[in-house]
Image (cartoon, rainbow, N blue to C red):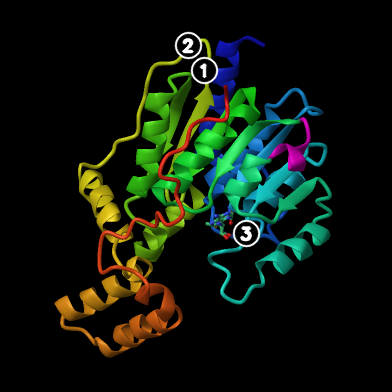
Amino acid sequence: MGTQAFFRQVIGAIGEADAHGLVSDKGADVLGGLSGRATVGLLQRLVGLVRDRRSLCYLEIGVFQGLSLLSVAIEHPDFPCFGIDNFSILDPKGENLGIIEDRTRRLHATNAHLINRDYEAALESLDTHIGSRKVAVFFIDGAHDYRSQLMALLLIRPYLAERAVIVVDDANYFDVRQASRDFLVAHPEFKMVFEAYSPGHPANLGRDVLDAHEAGWLNGVNVLVHDAEHVLPTMLPRVEPLARDLYVNEWLVHRHRYAELAPQAMDLAAAAIEGGDTMGPTARLVDAHAGDKAKFGARYPDRNLHCDGLPARRFTDWS
Ligand SMILES: C[S@@+](CC[C@H](N)C(=O)[O-])C[C@H]1O[C@@H](n2cnc3c(N)ncnc32)[C@H](O)[C@@H]1O
């Protein structure tokens, strides 16, 4: 099949997912999670387009309780599916690994493989997990900070199949769109073919609006394809002017003595500014500080560089 025909199939699959959501309700009794039904339906359909079933695979970052990974795996039992998660967030009771294992067993999804690691460590040595396979469909749904989003796109490049499709979830976040855009601008051999957004994060939507977006793309997606022949036009996600200020803030926060306490400090600031109860946020801030008092005490009030032990100068070993 020619490249143009392949891109038409991809765009057709997006249209099908947009209109019909999941391919089937095979996993409905067992699976629940945090991805829109159109998003999961697209992943299922994209894997259905893969011709070479032996040397390619599906890979995702962000398994949570297995909705996206297992939905793809049960729809394509002949196709190897890998999911990376280190269970660092959204798992306060430490039960998600057990839930995935249980669901995998109940669905007989023997082609689904969990990589229980930080995404960066996993991607830096991906061949130890997926062997010589290349990644045909890559789903990014892990940590949504700018750096994690961009690193996921950069680190996967050597492992991508010639006809790879990348689905970036949670593109409602401006950090996520910024990372997609920065990657696309720096790598013109990748093109965005589709973007979809909702009016807010699911946590901030009313039930009726949320229902529609749970059936769709939930918290937004960017879909990218590898386009080495430059067949497709350039299409970039919108980025926000405020991002510039916020990335400068990031530098100011990161060098501060109490950098890691920024989320708790913001909650306290909000309570103080809005005239709310400051006792709870103060207690949480003090608690978080107490947990690492020695570390914070060893720092300067500001302009901490974390440069101890760096060489004064060093040349390459090459001669
Ligand atoms: C939104 S959930 C994924 C939802 C899932 N795709 C679904 O369909 O329900 C995000 C997941 O990313 C994982 N995650 C966050 N940071 C990570 C990291 N640095 N490395 C690996 N996984 C990470 C979290 O543990 C969490 O389970």
Q: Nearer the viewer, residue 33 or 210?
A: 33
Could you classify mark 2 by the number of other residues whose Cα lies within 10 Å: few (under 14), some (14-19), or many (20 or more)? Answer: few
- Front disc: 3 or 2: 3
Label pair 2/1, CB-CB below 8 angstroms? yes
Q: Position of residue 35 (x, y in %)?
A: 54, 53
Task: Give the quarter of the image for residue 79.
Answer: top right
Which of the two discs, 3 and 2, labels the residue nearer the N terminus? 3
Disc 3/disc 2 C-alpha distance (Å): 37 Å
Which of the two discs, 3 and 1, labels the residue nearer the N terminus? 3
- The dot on residue 227 is 1
Could you classify mark 1 by the number of other residues whose Cα lies within 10 Å: few (under 14), some (14-19), or many (20 or more)? Answer: many
Label 1 amino acid? Answer: Asp
* Span colored in magenta: 126-132
Q: Which residue is mark 2?
A: 231
Is 116 covered by the magenta stretch? no
Q: Which residue is mark 3?
A: 86
